[in-house]
Image (cartoon, helix red, strand yellow):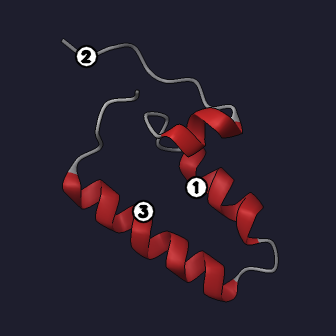
């Protein structure tokens, strides 16, 4: 499982996803593009993002 994102990042992603769902013609593609920016999430990995190196 990927590392957990910071709480502020999780809140931002949740709000951004809600905004995308309300306004986008193609919300799945837009959300996949958003999640590729945060590669330590399961949906980002499914969308093809490469997780960054493990942190110490």
Q: From the viewer's perspective, tell me whether residue 50 is left or right of residue 15.
A: right
Q: Which residue reaches farthest front?
A: 1
Q: From the viewer's perspective, tell me whether residue 19 is left or right of residue 9.
A: right
Give the mark nearest the N terminus, 3 or 1. Answer: 3
> Which x, y percent locates residue 40?
43, 34
Location of residue 12 (image quadrant): bottom left
Residue drawn where x is 29% and y is 43% of the image: 5
Q: CA distance from mark 2 to mark 3?
A: 21 Å
Q: What residue is disc 3 on?
A: 13
Rendered-image quadrant of the C terminus: top left
Few, some or many C-alpha atoms within 10 Å of disc 3 (few <14, some 14-19, many ≥20)? Answer: some
Q: CA distance from mark 3 to mark 1?
A: 8 Å
Location of residue 50 (image quadrant): top right
Q: Which residue reaches farthest bottom?
A: 22
CB atoms at circles 2 and 3 under 8 Å apart? Answer: no
CB atoms at circles 3 and 1 under 8 Å apart? Answer: yes
16 up-or-down from 52: above or below: below
Q: What residue is disc 2 on?
A: 55
Residue drawn where x is 61% and y is 31% of the image: 49
Q: What residue is disc 1 on?
A: 34
Few, some or many C-alpha atoms within 10 Å of disc 1 (few <14, some 14-19, many ≥20)? Answer: some
Give the mark nearest the N terminus, 1 or 2. Answer: 1
Disc 2 is placed on an element classified as: loop
Q: CA distance from mark 1 to mark 2?
A: 22 Å
Residue drawn where x is 69% and y is 40% of the image: 47
Q: From the viewer's perspective, tell me whether residue 14 is left or right of residue 47.
A: left
Give the mark nearest the N terminus, 2 or 3. Answer: 3
Few, some or many C-alpha atoms within 10 Å of disc 2 (few <14, some 14-19, many ≥20)? Answer: few
> Which x, y percent locates residue 8?
23, 59
């Amino acid at each position: 499982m990927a590392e957990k994102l910071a709480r502020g990042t999780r809140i931002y992603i949740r709000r951004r996803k809600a905004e995308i769902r309300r306004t986008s013609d193609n919300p799945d593609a837009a959300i996949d593009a958003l999640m590729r920016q945060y590669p330590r999430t399961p949906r980002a990995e499914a969308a093809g993002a490469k997780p960054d190196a493990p942190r110490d």
